[in-house]
Image: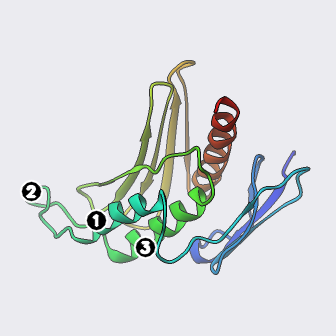
Amino acid sequence: MNVLALYTANAFGLAGLTVAPPLVVANHADFSVRATCAAPVARKAPALTPTGDLAALGDGFAAMRALKDGWDGLGSVAPARELIDRAASILSFALTDLSFVGVPAIVPVADGGLQAEWYSPTYRFELYFEPDGEIAAWSENRQTRVEMEEEGRDAIDMLLHWTSTLNYDRSLAA
């Protein structure tokens, strides 16, 4: 198994998650990533108030906090503050210092969940934060038509791998 990192995420209840390259070395108040790759890239822990491109991410979560039950008609549920905070923490960490990966659209789901979405002509990536705290990820390479889907710990692994790979690929093209 070619595993280069051990991911410990106490805040997410994901102790012992292993992730494949490319990944970075980082420390955060709630979790840490330790990598032993040839050329690790340091990611700083995200600030409590995102700046720069992450400000748009903060705006998306602020809009979610303003939702009330019934926002999408009878029976729709506003996302819980704890879910919003967890999603914001995970996404801020995943996107910190990745200048070639734009922030996702943050959209509510009528059942009280949240979804982060990235779409382009060549890929689609969605990360779903379920009301019960579970996480699911889905991606599609629009050129090859290959789809991937993961849940739980593997969904966060997929997010970190996908954002790091996309950032690297786009930096080469820049």
Q: Which residue is mark 3?
A: 85
130 on left or right of 20: left
Residue sticking out furthest to the left: 74
- Give me the residue at 59% from left, 77% from top: 11
Looking at the image, is mark 3 or mark 2 earlier in the sequence?
2
Looking at the image, is mark 3 or mark 1 earlier in the sequence?
1
Residue 94: % across, % down:
59, 58
**Which numbered mark, 2 or 1, is in the foreground of this view?**
1
Query: At label 2, which amino acid type do we have?
Result: Gly
Q: Which residue is mark 2?
A: 73
- Relative to 16, is 30 above or below? below
Q: Which residue is mark 1?
A: 64
- Relative to 124, is 82 above or below? below
Q: Residues within 10 Å of mark 1 (few under 14, many from 20)?
A: some
Q: Residues within 10 Å of mark 2 (few under 14, many from 20)?
A: few
- Real-space CA distance between mark 2 and mark 1, rounded to the nearest whole angstrom: 16 Å
Query: At label 3, which amino acid type do we have?
Result: Asp
Q: Secondary structure at mark 3?
A: helix
